[in-house]
Amino acid sequence: MTSPAATAGRVRRTSPRKRAQRIRWIQYGILVAVLIAIIAVADFPQIQKVFFRTDMIRDTLTQGLGTALLNTIIYSVGAFVLGLVLGTVLALMRLSSVGPYRWLAGIYIEFFRGLPTIVVLMAFGLLPLAFPGLQIPFGIYGTVWTALGIVAAAYMSETIRAGIQAVPKGQVEAARSLGMPTGPTTRKIVLPQAFRIIMPPLTNELILVVKDSSLAYIIGLSATSFDLTKYGRDLANTNANLTPLVIAGLCYLLITLPLTFLVRRMERKTAKAR
Amino acid sequence: MTANPAQQHTDSSRSGSTVVEITGLRKSFGPVEVLTNITTSIRQGDVVCVIGPSGSGKSTLLRCVNLLEQPSGGSILIEGIEVTDPDCDIDEVRSRMGMVFQQFNLFAHLTVLSNCTIAQQVVLKRGKAEAEKVALVNLAKVGLADRSGAFPAQLSGGQQQRVAIARALSMDPELMLFDEPTSALDPELVGDVLAVMRRLASEGMTMMVVTHEMAFAREVADRVIFMDGGVIVEEGHPDDVIGNPQHNRTRTFLKRVLDPTHVDSEGDSGESDARRRIKDAEVAAHAQPAVHDDTEGHGS
């Protein structure tokens, strides 16, 4: 054994690289220790019974999971498309040379960004009660699309505006110098490039809309219009078991993960056209 | 050789009608007056080069011609149409004027071919097939027909600028505006672009070129405009404006451009002028023997 003084001397002599290596080993050590602790402590049969009960998995899969998954996709895609269109209009209004358009868009954006999505959904669910005779087209679907789309538009318009502003001014000048009027210049030159620029943040928005669609239950859905969360939650409640919710959660990943992958591929493909 | 005089003849006979007529043009950015009382005109077939120090307003003048900048005063007539008139259909007028930018400004999301067809389809309402045919003819003219499927980012600066020229040409313009087309290029790529412009000029295209390429201006231009401080200081044949400038400001500018290492000092401008005249004489002398040899050849 070396004396304390000698140890101190050796510590001082340790090179930064060796020290970093030692710290790395310690980090691995902690990780392994935590894993061992979890495995030792965990009650696996209980976990399996609560989260992955085989008969519950079967029930969840067969009692209308497909419909719920499809509904979630329909709610999200419709809301996203509506939000995209409305968001683009709002972004163009924000950049308009007409003052009132700018102000209106600004007020809209601040208003719907500030409200909880669930409040907007409730309001739209109650609208037919407040205005007898008011019919939102496509029934429940139309209500969810409008409510989620209106909120998504407020968020997306700021992203789209940033994208439009990121397109170099020379692009517009070139188009105008060729005699192209403002409308076609915006539609064929500016917007395609703007959307290419904002593809990553827009993917983010889509994923947020997918998750927000889980709030649709608040307007009172019938069994055929259940979304994933509502479907999973009902089954979980009646059986006092979390397995259906786990399955529903995995289904969200089933939607979002391929989406992320797809967008990343599209980005790589369009990278050369930037 | 025999074709040359004939071509020259058509060129001179064509330069008759006035394409651009600028009268008393003024342009201010806020309190700063960038152009002051500019009056000049360009006739059909003319190649006019605009030279001058940076900030002299030459790019602004060019951008006023197709109204990318809104003039503050004066008038600009394009083939007799007053473009500053609010009733003027500027898109229609612009479609007959090609513009080439310093930064190329190719549409980044479109292929080379689509860059050249989109305005044809949108503005001239040409069908896809016809537009592509026209585009390919012009791409061949700039030597890039084989890159029609590429995206701008895949091309070198010189290639991009040639595509930009082809894009403008695809609109069958009556006038081409060039805004420092070679200033953003690596030196070794300048030649290809200038070659394309030289060919255009020889084909009789009416051109207005803002440039720092003095050799090109001297060789190709019918007329050179020297601008400084927002006014036209000197205007005339390149041999006069570049070869034998009358104004001090022109001389100082040319000295700086032609010999960047030169340090200004009072009193040596005359000497430098003399040197240039000697150089010109030398060039002329070099040209002489060639003709002489030719005649000798005929004699023997």
Image: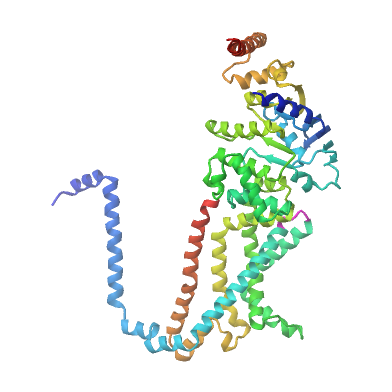
Where does the N terminus of chain B fall, quadrant-wise? top right
Picture residue at 78% right of the left edge, 44% below the top: B93
Picture residue at 63% right of the left edge, 9% below the top: B278
> Is residue B291 positioned above or below A139 on the image?
above
Q: Which residues are magenta?
A: A94-98
Determine the main secondary structure of the stretch shown in magenta.
Answer: loop
User: Image check: A262 left or right of B292?
Assistant: left
Q: Residue furthest left?
A: A1
Measured as percent of width and height from the top left, residue B213 is found at 63, 27
* Residue closer to the observer: B146 or B40: B146
Q: Does A254 appear in magenta?
A: no
User: Image check: A265 left or right of A30?
Assistant: right
Q: Confirm whether residue A242 shows in the render.
A: no
Measured as percent of width and height from the top left, residue B254 is found at 66, 20
> Is residue A273 positioned above or below B77 on the image?
below
Where does the C terminus of chain B fall, quadrant-wise? top right
Measured as percent of width and height from the top left, residue B290 is found at 59, 14
User: Image check: B200 left or right of B27?
Assistant: left
Measured as percent of width and height from the top left, residue B251 is found at 69, 17
Residue B205: quarter of image: top right
Q: Residue furthest bottom?
A: A238
Picture residue at 63% right of the left edge, 37% below the top: B102
> Is residue B160 positioned above or below A269 on the image?
above
Picture residue at 77% right of the left edge, 42% below the top: B67
* Residue closer to the observer: A181 or B74: A181
Q: Does A95 appear in magenta?
A: yes
